[in-house]
Amino acid sequence: MSKVIQGKIFVVDDNIDTDQIIPAEYLTLVPSKPDEYEKLGSYALIGLPDRYGKFIAPGQMKTTYPIIVAGENFGCGSSREHAPIALGASGVEAVVAQSYARIFFRNCAATGELYPWESVERLCDEFQTGQEVTIDFDQNQIVNHALNKVYALKPLGEVRPVIDAGGIFAYARQTGMISR
């Protein structure tokens, strides 16, 4: 099934850890409660250094950046499932990183919150926050419209249908692995 994601990007570099994605003080929020899920999203990337700018504008609950572009080892640190959930709750649909911490990648699939694309090239040095891009799932590519360039992405593989379904439990129910 054909799928694309379009929008502005938020660019970070290497070793963005789960404390920067969602600081520990917000882990008491329960994502299964709709109002707390929304609040969790409003704190996404609040732990980043000031040099990146604001991911969510003051007074807003959602980001204007549906795509994050990152360097190596995105999502390193603790194994908190809240990290991809906070990003998804904030309005992020995909992260395009040079590489991921294994547990963050796995939590993306488990929660079904966002697509963890791996770039073939190091994009975080070339892309800038606010540029418009399109991710084409069928072509495994990201188009940077400001640069008028197309970049290859590594295929999502078997993780795509799990995220499409809404996470590992939804996928298991959908495919008959567990009863509905």
Image (spheres, helix red, strand yellow):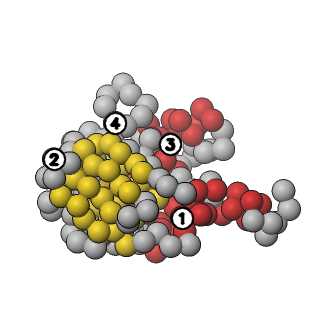
Q: Which mark is residue 89?
A: 3
Spatial CA distance of label 1 from label 4 is: 24 Å
- Percent of width and height locating residue 58: 32, 28
Q: Quadrant of residue 75?
A: bottom left
Which quadrant, please, contains the C terminus?
bottom right
Spatial CA distance of label 3 from label 4 is: 12 Å
Label 1–label 2 contact, CB within 8 A: no
Farthest-out residue, top? 59
Q: Nearer the viewer, mark 2 or mark 4?
A: 2
Residue 61 visible in the current orientation = yes
Spatial CA distance of label 1 from label 2 is: 27 Å
| 62 shown above or below 16 | above
- Percent of width and height locating residue 93: 44, 49
Spatial CA distance of label 2 from label 4 is: 17 Å
Residue corresponding to mark 4: 64
Who's the residue at 38% across and 66% down the image? 140
